[in-house]
Amino acid sequence: MEVYHSQVLVCGGKGCISPDSVDLYRSLKSEIRKHKLNHEIEVLRTECLGLCELGPVVIVYPEGIVYNKVKGEDIAELVESYFIRNKILERLEYKVLEGEGKIRNLNRLEFFKKQLRIALRNCGIIDPENIDEYIAFDGYKALEQVLTAMSPLEVTETVKKSGLRGRGGGGFPTGLKWQFAAAQDTDEKYIICNADEGDPGAFMDRSVLEGDPHSVLEAMTICGYAVGSRKALYMLELNIH
Amino acid sequence: MKTIQDLEEIRKNTFNKVNQGTDRKTTRIVIGMATCGIAAGANEVYDAIVDEVSKLGLTNVIVAKTGCIGVCRLEPLVEIIRPGEEKVTYVQMSPYKARRVVASHVLVGTVRDEYTMHVIQGKILNDYTLDNDY
């Protein structure tokens, strides 16, 4: 088994076909072999990396140095400079911008930086099976407030005023639904959680139930208080299509 | 737990365990173990981390399972939050990589950058696919 200390990726995408028609991958591999480094340095060709503007692209790991606009005639110099003399070939080096390169914290990614998570606020942060961790981030505080300081009517009014709507296609006003349910004059009322998630391919409900189940329990309990129900059901259907 | 005071006690005592800010006093190791994580092999990663932590005799370390962290295709994900440090997200972990991370980052503070995300022009390059060697 070879133990490589370096991995070189040569992009094999259409945008990275060298302007002088040299097969960079073949050329790099033979240059490495010429210097007898082929047991330490692994050369791999990848599919399109998506960096077509910078092509042809050569990336060296573990450092993560990105060489851009690499031409066939540069290969010999690249190998000599970086792998033998340990110096980055500056004229071909892609200088990383702010927020690029090796990113340590997931939340610094452009994609995640701008997100304000509400329903998924605890997912990926707390241990979903540990109620203490849910409590640590103000879990069950809402229920505490509802049970000690609010009447069922006040709870329904608060939900109505908030404008909260159902997340299904209908978008029915939640507060109104609770108001209608509360108005029913009957002994037994049930809160039902639809955990079926019938939408093919959808998994947002699963994410919440897996990552933050107590938030759902707390919400159902608040609903039960507002509506006058003493029993709740989880509806989970095993759908094998 | 019987009273509202008990709830407040739990909140106060547990906040420091879960909090991801730099004012933590203990190290927290979080492993993504939702459906995405488990499908990618997070169970083995979790076991390896628990074993390595005990093997190295590390105290002051919390190892926790969590739900979906948000980048399912890079699972298994392991996040390390040490006191005074910003959180580090390790991607595409394996039991071997996890043990290295514990022995390096958690034990002595050397971040293993080769296991973090590599982002160029907004693209995460970690899950590149290899082309045929023709």
Image (cartoon, coloured by chain):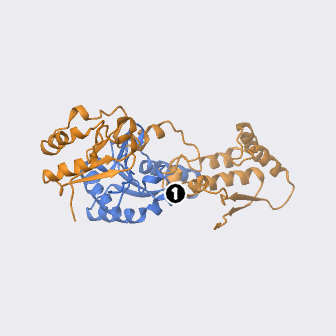
Q: What is the quadrant of the C terminus of chain A in the image?
A: bottom right
- What residue sits right under mark 1 in the picture? A128
In the rendered view, does B12 fall on the left or right side of A233?
left
| Residue A2 in the image: above or below residue A174 | below
Q: Could you tell me which residue is drawn at 81 percent across and 62 percent down?
A: A188
Q: Nearer the viewer, residue A27 or A163?
A: A27
| Residue reaching furthest to the right | A185
Residue at the spot x=68%, y=54% of the render?
Answer: A220
The answer for which chain carries disc 1 is A
Q: Is residue B34 visible?
A: no
The residue drawn where x is 12% and y is 41% is A85
Number of numbered tags placed on the structure image: 1
> Residue A189: x percent and y percent?
79, 59
Residue farthest front in this picture: A21
Q: Nearer the viewer, residue A144 or A48?
A: A48
The one of A166 and A54 positioned closer to us in this rendering: A54
User: Looking at the figure, which quarter contains the N terminus of chain A?
Assistant: bottom left
Q: Is A154 displayed left or right of B76 in the figure?
A: right
Q: Amino acid at mark 1?
A: Pro
Q: Is residue A47 visible?
A: yes
Residue ID at (80%, 46%): A179
Q: Position of residue A135 (x, y in %)?
A: 53, 51
* Residue B108: x %, y % from top left: 23, 51
Badge 1 element: loop
A47, A86: nearer the viewer: A47
- Give above or below for B22 relative to A6: above
Query: How packed is label 1: few (under 14 Cα within 10 Å), some, or many (20 or more)?
Result: many
Residue A26's x, y, as percent?
25, 50
User: In the drawing, does residue A70 fall left or right of residue B119?
Assistant: left
| Chain shown in orange | A
* Chain letter, colour blue in render: B
A71 to A179, vertically: above or below: above
